[in-house]
Image (spheres, grey):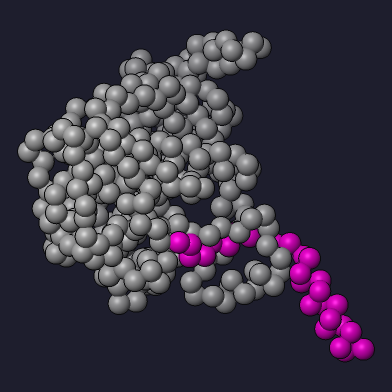
Amino acid sequence: MLVSLVVVVALAGLFIPVSYVIIEPGNATPVSGVVSVKGARTYRSRGSLLFLTVSVSNGKPNLWRYVGASLDDSAEVISYRDYFGTTTPAQDRKLNVAAMDTSQQVATQVALEKLGYTVTETGTGARVIAMTRGAPAAGTLKPGDVITAVDGQPVELIDELGPLVRRHLPGVPVALTIERAGTDAKAMKPETVTVTPGANPKAPNKGSAYLGIAAETRDLKFDFPVEVTIDPGAVSGPSAGLAFTLAIIDKLTPGSLTGGRKVAVTGEMRSGGTVGEIGGVAQKAVAAKNAGATLMLVPRSEAREARTTAGSMKVEGVANLDDALAALRRSGGDAIDVAVPRAA
């Protein structure tokens, strides 16, 4: 009887889903294999820059999967609601695919501008993709809305939206000019709405006014003087941006940024050269360590978390591209020559 009960419980655990998401170490992939450049002279480099991924459970895991992950120091277990917020898994995937596409373009922009090229960026507003849970803009804005001005100040690129909102104190209403689809899905109707921003609960702008939305630049276009192609396969999300930027710079300059070492890199690359936070940094540190990396570059605010699972691998926190280049230089990498872009 006892044996039968144990068998029943064990089998039941295989089919009982739990409302959690499991994040585990993923892969560490050499960036040189996914980045190619045409239209300029390129150079071979010693060592390798690695971009990092995490493995995220599909759907809701069964009970035993949850128990095993809870006991695994290299895994993180997050409630389904905290991970997805008000978005569905399908919306989350769409958001991450869009973020990867944008990260590739921004990474290329930042790299080429660092090397002295001129890159033109254009857009037609900030399109709302999703809301965070409890977003101050919920009920006023909705996915698909395009913000074209804040208090009458034009917004063409997503990077222009945040600074304009942060001019206000939390609790002070903001007037947003938006375009919203009407009964004719192709017709966007301009209107003005008012949103009262809340206080951002997260770094790097903790305490400042925020709307609680995820957005992208509508009709984003870059005029690149050099053709850069990035093909990371099925990987999505923005966290490989810094790695892409460094790989492009490494290909376009003599010497080696890594000094012949394996260097793991994670962090969102933002226009202007700043490095944004990413998720799963502890799991990515495990992937980097397992791949034999001797140095890992992470967003500065997440360096302490990465060190908890990094073992003897050195972890450097960086706030921007210049910090990353300086960290590589200190670890034995070559300085870059940004004097004159070289034609092919």
Q: Position of residue 69 (x, y in %)?
A: 59, 71
Q: Is residue 7 above or below residue 337?
A: below
In-front residue for pair 134/286: 286
**Residue located farthest toward the bottom when viewing the structure as drawn:** 2
Residues drawn in magenta: 1-27
Q: Position of residue 35 (x, y in %)?
A: 34, 45
Q: Residue at x 47, y 26 (%)?
A: 127
Q: Is residue 154 above or below residue 127?
A: above
The answer, for residue 299, to whether it is visible in the render is yes
**Residue 16 is inside the magenta segment:** yes
The answer, for residue 298, to whether it is visible in the render is no
Q: Is residue 55 above or below residue 202?
A: below
Q: Residue at x 44, y 23 (%)?
A: 218
Q: Position of residue 66 (x, y in %)?
A: 65, 69
Left or right of 26? Residue 272 is: left
Q: Position of residue 114 (x, y in %)?
A: 18, 39
Q: Residue at x 52, y 23 (%)?
A: 145
**Residue located farthest toward the left when viewing the structure as drawn:** 339
Q: Residue at x 34, y 71 (%)?
A: 292
Question: Where the N terminus falls, by quadrant?
Answer: bottom right
**Residue 288 is inside the magenta segment:** no
Q: Quadrant of residue 134?
A: top right
